[in-house]
Image (cartoon, rainbow, N blue to C red):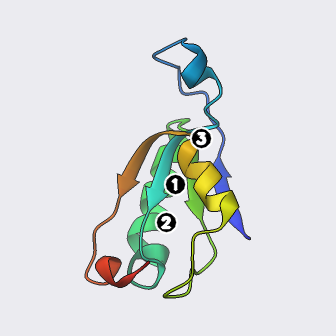
Amino acid sequence: MGMETASSSFPSSSTSSSTERLKYDVFLSFRGEDTRNNFMDHLFIALKEKGINTFRDDEKLEKGKSLSLELLKAIVESRFAIVILSKDYTSST
């Protein structure tokens, strides 16, 4: 599965053991076809430039397919999620 992450120098606001194991500051959730090559690219680059460790899945998840274990793990290992709502987002699975 192709994924892209931005490295982080983003300071941690908490030092509890539950946040120490988090791998990402932000998980980006979006429907690829209608946002991937425009808004998502700009947002991802802006977060990366600010030093925010960001996860975005660069593989197209086919309609009706389950989320991969790797994608679920990235969600669990993220401090925050940003959901990009678009016309086609609700039709994704």
Q: Secondary structure at mark 1?
A: helix
Question: How many badges with numbers are in the image?
Answer: 3
Nearer the viewer's eye, disc 3 or disc 2?
3
* Mark seen at residue 4: none
**Number of the front mark, 3 or 1:** 3
- Residue at 62% x, 71% y is 58
Q: Residues within 10 Å of mark 3 (few under 14, many from 20)?
A: many
At which x and y percent is residue 81? 41, 48
What secondary structure is found at the residue carrying circle 2?
A: helix
Residue linked to disc 3 = 77
Mark 1–mark 2 Cα distance, whole angstroms, equals 6 Å
Kind of residue sitting beneath label 3: Glu
* Residue at (28, 75) in percent of width and height: 86
Report which residue position mark 1 lands on. Answer: 45
Name the residue type under label 1: Ile
Is residue 40 or residue 62 the one in the foreground? 62
Amino acid on which the number 2 mark rests in the picture: Asp
Q: Is residue 6 left or right of residue 12?
A: right
Q: Secondary structure at mark 3?
A: loop
Label 3 – label 2 distance at C-alpha: 22 Å
Q: Quickly name the residue at label 2.
A: 41
Q: Along the polypeptide, which appears first: circle 3 or circle 1?
A: 1
